[in-house]
Amino acid sequence: MPGFHLPSEDEFDPSTDDFVLRSISKERNYKHFDLPLSEIERDSQVDFRSEKKPHRFWPLLGFTDLSRRYVRVKEKDGSWKKNTHGKFVREEIVKPRPIRYAGHEDAAYLQAYAMHLNSFYEQALIIDGSTSSVLAYRKGGGTNIHHAKLLFDEITSRGDCTVFAMDISGFFDCLDHKMLRDEVAGLIGVERLDGHHGRVWKNITKYSWVETDDLDKLLGQKRNGHGRVCSPQDYTAHVQGRKGGLVRKHDLDYGIPQGTPVSGLYANIYLRTFDREMIALCAQYGGSYRRYSDDIAVVLPFGAKVQHVVAVVEKLLADHRLAMSVAKTETAAFKGGSLVSPKPIQYLGFTFDGHHTLIRPSSIDAYLGKMRSGIHAKLIAAKMQNIPSANVYQRELRSRYTHAGKRRNFIRYAHRSADIMGSAEIKRQVKSHQAWFDRAWNDEIERVYGGLVTTSDR
C-alpha cells in the first residue's frame, strides 16, 4: 500500500498479539502523521493521577485489509470434494477487515494509559474470581497454544464432560459505547468519566481517521513526507482542509477500532459483567468457563443439553448488545476421556479428540493458499521485469513459508505448538511442507510463465 507501512508482524502466527500490555513501549516504525519516537520519548512516564496538559490526538490512519480464508469444499454427502488429481478442492473466502492505527505519540500515550487502567482491571479480576477465565490481552498469560492445551488437559482430567466452543460475532465492531463507559466508570469507582479517562473513551469510541487511499488519490503515491505519511504542510492544507478535508468521523454509538494499545483492555472491561455471569452459571453446574477475546469455551458435566446451554449464552450476550456466531458453535462429548460425539472439539486453532491434538485443517488450508498467493505475486513481479523463471530467487519465499531462515512463520508456529502440546501428530501434519512449496512453485511457474521450470534454492 503506497505511502503507508505497517510493522512487520508474522502473518500466520495466531499467538502474535499487539494488544498484550507492555510496561515498556514498543518501537513502531510505520509512517503516520507524526514521526516515530525515540527510545527516551517512548519510555517517558505519564502521571495520570495529576495530568495537567490534555493530550491531543491525531486522526487514526485506516485502510481495508482483505482477509482471505481457504476452506475445503464438501460434497452433498458431507465428504470433502477432490479434483481429478486427488487434491482437496478449496474455496477462497474474502472478508474485508477495516484497520485503524494510531500515531506514534498517541500509541505511546494510549499504551501508558492502558497500563494505568489495567491496574484497576487486574485487581477487579481477583475480586471477581475471573483471573483464570479471562485469557487474552493480558501480560504473562501465555499464547493461544498454552490456553488451548489447558482446555484439553481439563477434558482429559475430567474424563466425562461436554464441551462447548462458541464465538462472539463482530465483537470490537459491536461494543456499545455507553455500556463500555459504564463498565470503565464502575471499574475505577466513579459515576462519570472525566479527565484522561473521558478523553480516551471519547477518542476511542468517536474516533476520527483518514483512509490511506484518499491520501494516495489526493497527494499521489510517491509523496515525500520526510518520515511521515505526508508533510505537515500537506496535512494542514489537505488532510484537515478548510473545506472537504480527508478526516472521517465514526459517528455510530457502537464499535471501537481494533488497532490501538487500549482496544484489547477495553474489550475485556466491556465483558467484565458477562464473564462474572458465565463463571457463576458454569460453577452452578460444576463446570468451567474461559474466554480468549471473542472465543468462549465452556466445560460441563457429561450430558449437558446443547440447545439449552447455547440459548442461555445467547441471552447473556444479547444483554450486552452482542450476538453469537451460531454457525461457528462447536460441541463435543467425552466419556472416559475419549470422544463419543461425531466431531472433535475445536478451540483457538486446534482440534482435540481426547487422544490427539492437531492444527485444524482450515489453518493449514489458509497457509497453503497464502503460500501460493505469495509465490504467484513474486513470479508476476519477476516476469514484469523480464527475469527468466529459472533466475527467480526462492530464498526469501522459503524463509517465509518453510522452516528455512529465522523468521517466524506458520511452520515454526506448528513446530512450537507440537512441542508445547506434546503432539507428534502436529509435526506429521506439516512434515511435507517443503514438497508443498516445491509443488506450488512449479504450479505457479507453469501458470505465470506457461512452462514448467524447476529451479534450485536460490
Image (cartoon, grey):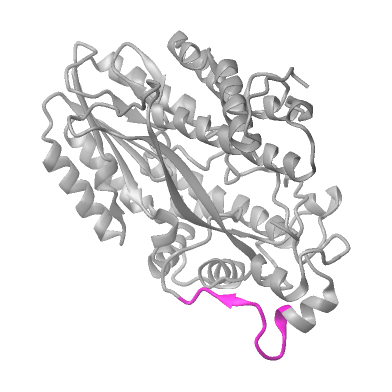
Magenta residues, start to end: 239-251
Residue that extends furthest to the bottom in the rendered view of this protein: 243
Image point 66% across, 72% down: which residue? 214
Main structural element of the magenta stretch: helix, strand or loop? loop
Q: Position of residue 147 (x, y in %)?
A: 44, 28
Viewed as shown, does residue 336 lie left or right of 402?
left
Residue that extends furthest to the right in the rendered view of this protein: 226
Viewed as shown, does residue 413 lie left or right of 171?
right
Viewed as shown, does residue 264 lie left or right of 403?
left
Would you say residue 391 sits in the magenta stretch? no
Image point 42% across, 68% down: which residue? 177
Q: Quadrant of residue 306?
A: top left
Image point 62% across, 28% down: which residue? 409
- Residue 421 drawn above or below residue 255: above
- Where, quadrant-wise, is the C terminus in this rendering? top right
Viewed as shown, does residue 410 lie left or right of 150?
right
In this figure, what is the number of numbered marks?
Answer: 0
